[in-house]
Image: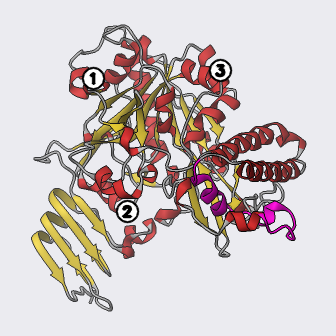
Amino acid sequence: MSSLAKEPNSSLILPDLYRKLHSSHLGNITDRITLTDLSKAMSGGGMSQFQEAIRQELEEAMKVDLEKILSTAPESELEHTKKDLGGFQKLFHRFLQEKGPSVDWGKIQRPPEDSIQPYEKIKARGLPDNIASVLNKLVVVKLNGGLGTSMGCKGPKSLIGVRNENTFLDLTVKQIEHLNKTYNTDVPLVLMNSFNTDEDTKKILQKYSHCRVKIYTFNQSRYPRVNKESLLPIAKDLSYSVENAEAWYPPGHGDIYASFHNSGLLDTLIDEGKEYIFVSNIDNLGATVDLYLLNHLMNPPNGKRCEFVMEVTDKTRADVKGGTLTQYEGKLRLVEIAQVPKPHVDEFKSVSKFKIFNTNNLWISLSAVKRLQEANAIDMEIIVNPKTLDGGLNVVQLETAVGAAIKSFENSMGINVPRSRFLPVKTTSDLLLVMSNLYSLNAGSLTMSEKREFPTVPLVKLGSSFTKVQDYLKRFESIPDMLELDHLTVSGDVTFGKNVVLKGTVIIIANHGDRIDIPPGAVLENKIVSGNLRILDH
């Protein structure tokens, strides 16, 4: 899934709109008006008539182009393409309507004390005897739209091996199968794929046919990238050709509500008696089904069910960019760093003022999704994600984030969960942690080893020689013992022999042209290793 961040609408400022508008000798208005002109026009006071005219012209030009693209759809793809392009058109319309920063900083308040509950309080309630019947109301949804390119892998990220040759997807299936066998339940797994991951994922699903887990898939929408200057799609048709590959994108995980509904799967699951979905990123190995949280949803102490629960956890200095829950105009609201006006970014990053961040582990009522989706009442801020394509063309992606919808649901709340429920694997540095003896693997779930004397995870920074999984694996003959490690930094051409032990703070730096081979069985405790250390066979 592409990263949701970058810049809010208001930060795009370019030439003088008024001058362009009155250049009457020029052709069609859309040849002259760009995204940044529009932003400048929108940022000033009320909507004047000429600003409205520009908007209408841009919308009309977009409509014409989308109709041309739709006309190239094969009959078999016509229906869902119509839905995709219709969804994009709504998003584009909203994008043209919005002006200025998406949050008024003066209105942001800390959430009320009772709106974010501590996990310990929820766990203390215990579990009812009928936990199996509660589990049977649950569906696990994994966000599976992302590729493994950032870790040097081809294909879906979920198919990267992370522990004992198990992939992210293997671990997920094992976790749910263990639940179903233990409690004699039928908790299904739903994968939200993107057009980038769907084909490869479906091929691999055959290997789980004998597992005690029903697996469903549906696809995220496929939206057209927009030229930053003309504000028109760069795609001319719907083909999946190599030339056309960069013309389309999956529009962020906020698309789950519409695409889940459009797929028909939402209704199917409701008809089967399912009531809640547990949604998380497939690369978050800490996001397992928690029976205490589920029981709290299904059997709330005050009798009033929550439609949306967001798992948050305490912020550390490493998490300062993570979205945080705030109180805004009387409702809980997720605020991302991209929405924060520049003068307030440091305040947003403050660990003392905003103490928690969103793990993107979400528990959501299926009937509420259906109600809100059918009423077109799910409100998520648009995130403008500028990209530069390989050929140098500047484009814009309009995206949304799944957690941003929290303000549209009734009786929403946050639960402050242990850090162990947030274990994302974004880099090979993260991969080293989860492959090591810091964690033990049981029924697909990773838990911190009891031999680790303190519960914090070491800080690991591997240099660029380790970025690709293939290169990373070649540099470790075996994964070091890290039970007593606090901090590891590795830079340059470094390899590790078998049975290396790392303790305390270890820094290993091979300068350009040098190479360091850490010998088999070496114990490094509070050491800095630099220079050149070669171990050669003889």
Q: Position of residue 313 (x, y in %)?
A: 29, 39
Q: Which residue is pictured at 87% across the width and 67% down the height?
A: 27
Q: Where is residue 62 in the image (x, y as percent from the top left)?
A: 79, 52
Q: Which of 53 and 509 is in front in this view?
A: 53
- Residue numbers of the magenta segment: 22-45
Secondary structure beneath label 2: helix
Residue located beneath label 3 in the image? 268
Query: Along the horizontal axis of the image, is 462 left or right of 3?
Result: left
Q: How far apart are marks 1 and 3 (CA)?
A: 35 Å
- Please tell me whether mark 1 or mark 3 is closer to you in this view: 1
Q: Which mark is residue 428?
A: 2
Residue 415, by quadrant, is top left
Q: How far apart are marks 2 and 1 (CA)?
A: 38 Å
**Residue 534, relative to residue 128: is it above or below?**
below
Answer yes or no: is residue 353 visible: yes
Q: Which mark is residue 114?
A: 1
